[in-house]
Amino acid sequence: MGIQRVFVTGIGIVSSIGNDEASVAESLRELRHGFAPFVQESVKTPGNVKLAGTVKGFDVSSPDFEDWTLPAPYRIRRDVLRSLPPHGTYVHVAMAQAIEAAKLEQADVSNLDTGIYTSSAGSTRLLYQNSKRLHEVGPMRCPPTGIVSSIAGTLSFNLVAQFKIRGNSCGFSSACASSGHALGFAYDDIALGRQKRMFVAAGEDINDESLLPFAGMRALSLESEPEKASCPFDRNRNGFVSTGGGAVLVLESEEEVNRRGVQPYAELLGWGQASDGHNVAMSHPEGVGLSEAIRRALRSANLDAGEVDYINAHATSTMIGDLSEGRALKEVFSNEGHSPKISSTKALTGHGLSLASALEASILSLAFKEGFTPGSAHIRELDEEFASLNIIRETLAEAPSVALSNSSGFGGANVTLAFRKV
Amino acid sequence: MSNEGIKPKLAQTPPDESADEQLKDTLKRCSPETIAAALAFRKSGDVELVPTVVLGIVERFLEPDQVDTLRNGDDSTKFMEDLGMDSLTMFEAIMMVEESLGVSIKNEELWDLRTVGDLKAFISSKLTGDPVESKAKFYPIEEIAAIMPQQTPFLFLQTAEIEGSKATGTYEISGKEAFLEGHFKGNPVFPASIMLEALGQLGVFHFLKTESEGGANSIFFTGADGVRCFRVCKPGDTLELSVELKRTREPMVVYSGKITVKGEKTAVADEITLIVAPEESE
């Protein structure tokens, strides 16, 4: 069997800008952000973070999962809920959406040729609670699902069991590039004929424990105005706005797409990755790892740089990260005379860490399907570093033909995915 | 329960208001009767209240469609088979029982609690200090497969219980057994010889669990007397196997055996003889 082509046939999105395809598309078209005041649950903790990309309709703030509520029509059984982290509810719902969008039957979901790759940082909230309880009352009074609901592989254990997945499964952990790696390796599995179908599922909590440590890193914006707080490429960008949520993509081989007779959202053409080898928490100032990841993605997808007409940038709205990416994009594209359209949808959604790449790949798939190119919001004064790049400020009423999606994680892990309109 | 925050250990004596509040919080999703019974138990220590508390806690963990099964059932209602609880839900329920009644239950004790009656009797005896009535010990397939020399596809025992010199067990004919293709063509009938094998395997399991000194032995089938079959068994039937140890005379072990299906007499064997060969030393 030769290399199989790989298609996106279903997506599921629970995000700050909407919990279904229609509302996410509308938010992107109208450049409507998903930020709301962030109110710390512990008033005793000193803090100055004012905004977060909140997930609407879900209430998973209680330390007791039996208090959690989901928006209609979604319901999760108690014995499923008890082993989920708070963000597990978002991802569970996104899985249901993706299965429906891809028109998958139970037999398509549960067989040896269908696997799942996940990414999630785990739940620091539940880790903290369980550790505290462990020291206070001992292990025999700790919830028996405490580990599986909190550690980094939590989405894999839960989704494999709950959706009866029988193929490859594994969790990916490379910070903000995690779900990019998950998508890349899922692509490889299908392209090489190891699996016919892969789910890629990602999610993150949004609460004190998951969000506030990034303020300690000086990575978060402390602004209270959303337009100033999340403004990738703007001269006055000052950090990212954190978000939670869940995103799921269904990837399938061309054979499966033809057999089932479904209309794909997009084709995943290939991917590339490379590392900075530079600093534990900051991107290389010249974007050396990212520019190489982009080149490798182009090679993998058999594309010339000039064929790319849109790039969904990682651009979180931090001073150093955006600059580094801008230089990588100049290096590969504008210095070579190419001017693909560029935007960062994080201006609207916020930055979802290990969720980011899967969320943006879902958004990109939706853009291909619905026929638009999302614009970059909240730029009031473009940083002149990005002046030679074609950064689009409005959503365009036409889908790109070929697009890239970038992600970069701590320690300089960079992933680029290449998609084509079908 | 579960992902909840810290609650200090319950004060055992004397009961005070804050301890009562903690107990109410622990039991917050239980029925008012359950909470009232737990509070009353804390004051009086009356073990008559235990079933109300225990059943109330079990009910709180059930899906809505299982509640009637518990309410209409009796002490023989099984947690897993009848109420759809899995082992994790059992842990959750037991932890709440422990917190509410001030008892502690060991893991190995937990495995034996299969029915509502088992749990009530167990908790009562814990609280009164009376010895727990000895009962049949249950073994799931994992434990059976771990010690049996026979293995899939030639293991015809899925569950087993041992009580003294007797053992009972079950095997559900799936229809996927390879030999059914030829026995008979187009008409799958479970062979009588394999029924006898299943009884022999139950004897082997009993021997390994009770009589064997733990040394590695080889066990072989050596004879069967007084074998009669009364019923044809087909895919979907569950063989209810039972054996009783008749005598042990080294190296022979002799059992009698019986099989029923839905209580209906299916096969008997007056004597099933196994020979136990000590491990060959080089």
Image: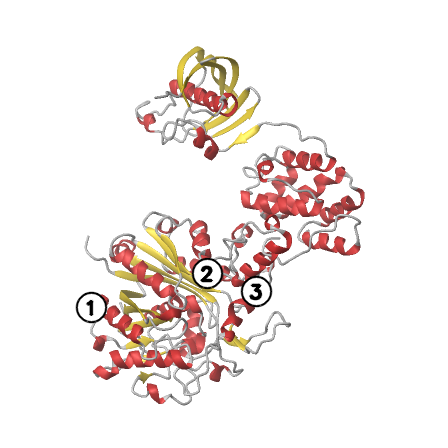
* Residue A402 as seen in the image, left or right of residue A210: left
Distance of label 1 from label 3 (alpha carbons): 45 Å
Viewer can see residue A126? yes
Q: For the residues tagged 2 and 1, is the chain the same? A: yes
* Residue A220 as seen in the image, left or right of residue B190: right
Q: Which residue is mark 3?
A: A59
Q: Nearer the viewer, residue B224 or A57?
A: B224
Q: Quadrant of residue B217?
A: top left
Element on which disc 2 rests: helix
Near mark 1 (Cα within 10 A), the count class, few <14, some 14-19 or many ≥20, is: few
Q: Amino acid at mark 2?
A: Val
Earlier along the polypeptide chain: callout 1 or callout 3?
3
Distance of label 2 from label 1 (alpha carbons): 33 Å
Q: For the residues tagged 1 and 3, is the chain the same? A: yes
Q: Quadrant of residue B225?
A: top left
Kindly identify which numbered label has been placed on residue A302: 1
Assess whether mark 3 and mark 1 are in contact (beta carbons under 8 angstroms): no
Residue A377 on image: x %, y %: 41, 82
Is the residue B207 above or below the residue A269 in the image?
Answer: above
Residue B6 on image: x %, y %: 64, 58
Q: Amino acid at mark 3?
A: Asp
Q: Which residue is mark 2?
A: A91
Is the residue B166 above or below the residue A129 in the image?
Answer: above
Choose mark 2 or mark 1, whichever is in front: 1
Q: Quadrant of residue A192?
A: bottom left
